[in-house]
Amino acid sequence: SSALTTAAIAAITPLMATAFSPQVQVARPSTTLGASYLESLSETPGNVVPTQYKNYLDSLASAQAAPAVAAPAVAAPVAAAESTSSESTGFCHVPFEYFHFDNLASKGPRPVCDWGTPQDWSRKLADDGVFRAGTWYCSEGGWESPNGKGVTEVFYMVEGHGMLGDSDGTKHFFGPGDMVIIPKGHTGRWDVNTPIHKVWAVNAHENVEESGPIIRVQVDHYKDFSPECLTDTSANDPLYGNTGSVASASNTFYDVGPTKVGVWASEPGSFEVASGVRQWFHMLEGTMFITDSSDGTSKRCVAGDTVMLPAGWSGYVDVVEPTKKVFTVAL
């Protein structure tokens, strides 16, 4: 009997060690995330949360009332790598590796929370004083946000699941592949249900532009970026003005004051940009080159890359493979 007990303990010990070992989130390419998330959503229409996804998030939400259990410690990242952005040209471009967890700087535990032990890591990409971009990683936890947000933030979800609440308690759930918009002036709540990794752009415009007594978060799902949701805008392109004979399509799903957010797609082809708008974009699919007319520098953009272009930027866009990207414009 003693021998059997010893053997049983020896057999389950490795399984217990694995089950309780902290797991490090591994970044995956946007196209893989998009495909898996789109698959999970299936044919569910519009803003309806899939049943299995909603049940999971509801269970997490109801668990918030339970006593908080300390989250596993997350290993501190190594020192940030040297920036790969190009400061000698009229635009800033980085591959997704720039935002890998190992390259992020720890900001430590959040000072105020009501469940979990949320800790922040981040890295900035660029900042012109009004329009800036970067990445943010946060472990599980939740907190109130009673003070009005000072900027309009737009982010694309790379990993994790979360919820943003409005001041009246309305909940907005989001996961990998979603675009989330937090307008300036928003108050409510943040819940990080599984560790979140996002790439973001912020427009620090002067005034609160939303109307109405309650400023609401907006979530647009990856499935809403499909071709049937886009409109041909080749002659009136929201990013480049006119793409000429190159077929392009887009959907601007947020257009309030000086901030526009949407998705843009293009078939292969080349066109010149005389005076582009100030923009941030994150590549979801395809391959394209952006060439700066000031010095001829060219950057290859593929899925996972992030780019910022200044107002009035001029150059050339060469779409090599059918391309799709999410964007934010700061006017």
Image: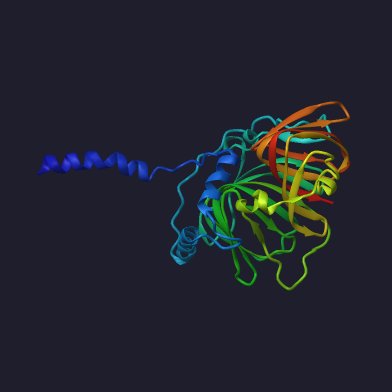
Task: Kindly tell me whether residue 120 is visible in this rendering.
Answer: no
The answer to which of 66 and 252 lies nearer the viewer is: 252
User: Residue 284: x and y, percent?
Assistant: 65, 41
Q: In which quarter of the view is residue 281 placed?
A: top right
Residue 16 image position (x, y, % from top left): 32, 44
Residue positioned most to the front: 245
**In terms of image quadrants, where is residue 111?**
bottom right
Colouring used for the render: rainbow
Relative to residue 47, is residue 64 drawn left or right? left
**Above or below 125: residue 296:** above
Q: Residue furthest top?
A: 296
Image coordinates for residue 232, horizontal then vertical, percent: 77, 49
Q: Position of residue 265 (x, y in %)?
A: 72, 44
Residue drawn at (71%, 30%) of the image: 84
Q: Is residue 27 left or right of residue 6?
A: right
Of 101 and 306, which appears nearest the observer?
306
What quarter of the picture does the N terminus occupy?
top left
